[in-house]
Image (cartoon, rainbow, N blue to C red):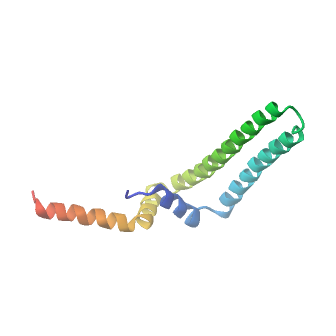
Amino acid sequence: NVISPSKLFSYLDQHWLSSSDKSRIKSAFASLEAQQQQQQEQATSNENNNKNRNEQENRNNHEHGSHIRKQKQELKRDVQIQTLHSKGLPGLYEAILQTSKDELCIALQEITKHLEKSPQ
């Protein structure tokens, strides 16, 4: 795979995300974590209720925790995509070259070998 999304987004994080972008992500993460903490505390306070009800709440908490993780990933990806869009095509090309040099080199070597074997 010449373009690795994980490498590309890692490059964006390291080289392009501004401190305000990172602060915005951290703030949003904190808000999501506070929501998760609040729900866990609410479930804990209801612990003395019916056992079947508690088991259902545990399942709901797990699902909510998964939902929070997914929201965090989506939020971070949105900021990364906005940053990439702000750089335009030159930025995309830069990121691809910086993150996929080895893969592109191999691909170009293979294309060259193929063309040398069967010239048109």
Left or right placement of residue 40 versus residue 48 in this view: left
Give the number of marks.
Answer: 0
Quadrant in the picture for the C terminus: bottom left
Q: Looking at the rendering, in which quadrant would you find the N terminus?
A: bottom left
Residue 36 vertical placement versus 103 (above, below): above
Q: Residue at x 18, y 65 (%)?
A: 113
* Depth order, front residue of 55/41: 55
Name the residue at 72% across, 37% down: 59
Q: Nearer the viewer, residue 23 or 50?
A: 50
Residue 78: x, y in percent? 59, 48
In this orientation, which residue lies closer to the viewer: 51 or 28?
51
Residue at position x 30%, y 66% in the image: 106
Residue at 24% x, 63% y is 110
Would you identify the image quadrant in which residue 107 lies? bottom left
The relative height of residue 45 versus residue 105 in the rendered view (above or below) is: above
As drawn, is 60 to the left or to the right of 75?
right
